[in-house]
Amino acid sequence: MGSETPLRLPTIDFSTPELNPGTPDWDSVKAQVRKALQEYGCFEAFFSKIPLDLRKALFGALEELFDLPLQTKLRNASKKPFHGYVGLYPMVPLFESMGIDDAPVPEKAKAFSQLLWPEENPNF
């Protein structure tokens, strides 16, 4: 029996100060993103300017979001393909995503939160 090496997602550093379109750093990161998506379908984005406690809070909120009951997650429906709640694919049983239409618009983000947590969730 051979040993299996655990799969590790590629980590891509986006905190380079000169990360601007057309620069060598941009081209390098762009190539890393393309390779990661082609080989793994995803990657871990690293941006050192985001404090560790904020990153932990974000991932905690995401865990809380995806731990909601399926019927609750299904409330986030969208007419756009692959927007809203996406999951339940037999070919990729561990895949879920949750699109928030117009997330940068405060009213839309609040409407999304109230849709999933009618009783309010001040942490989200």
Image (spheres, rainbow, N blue to C red):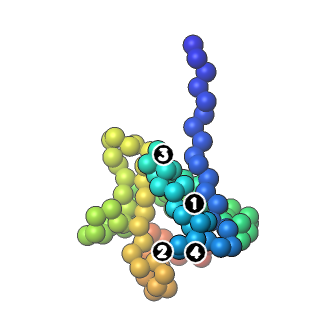
Residue 48 percent coordinates (x, y): 71, 66
Which of the two discs, 1 and 3, sits closer to the camera?
1
Question: Which of the marked residues, 2 or 4, is nearer the chain's N terminus?
Answer: 4
Q: Which residue in the structure is indicated by mark 4?
A: 20
Residue at horizontal 47 percent and vertical 44 percent from the top: 39
Q: CA distance from mark 1 to mark 4?
A: 11 Å
Question: Which of the marked residues, 1 or 4, is nearer the chain's N terminus?
Answer: 4
Question: Which of the marked residues, 3 or 4, is nearer the chain's N terminus?
Answer: 4
What's the amino acid at mark 1? Ser
Q: Are marks 1 and 3 in contact (CB under 8 Å)?
A: no
Q: CA distance from mark 2 to mark 3?
A: 31 Å
Residue 23 occupies quadrant: bottom right
Looking at the rendered structure, which numbered label has been put on residue 28? 1
Q: CA distance from mark 1 to mark 3?
A: 18 Å
Which of the two discs, 2 and 4, sits closer to the camera?
4
Q: Quadrant of the N terminus?
A: top right
Q: Nearer the viewer, residue 17 or 50?
A: 17
Looking at the rendered structure, which numbered label has been put on residue 113? 2
Q: CA distance from mark 3 to mark 4?
A: 25 Å
Residue at horizontal 35 percent and vertical 66 percent from the top: 83
What's the amino acid at mark 3? Tyr
Q: Which residue in the structure is indicated by mark 3?
A: 40
Residue 63 occupies quadrant: bottom right
Q: Are marks 2 and 4 in contact (CB under 8 Å)?
A: no
Q: Secondary structure at mark 3?
A: loop
| Residue 60 appearing in the image | no
Question: Which of the marked residues, 1 or 3, is nearer the chain's N terminus?
Answer: 1
Residue 21 percent coordinates (x, y): 53, 74
Q: CA distance from mark 2 to mark 1?
A: 37 Å
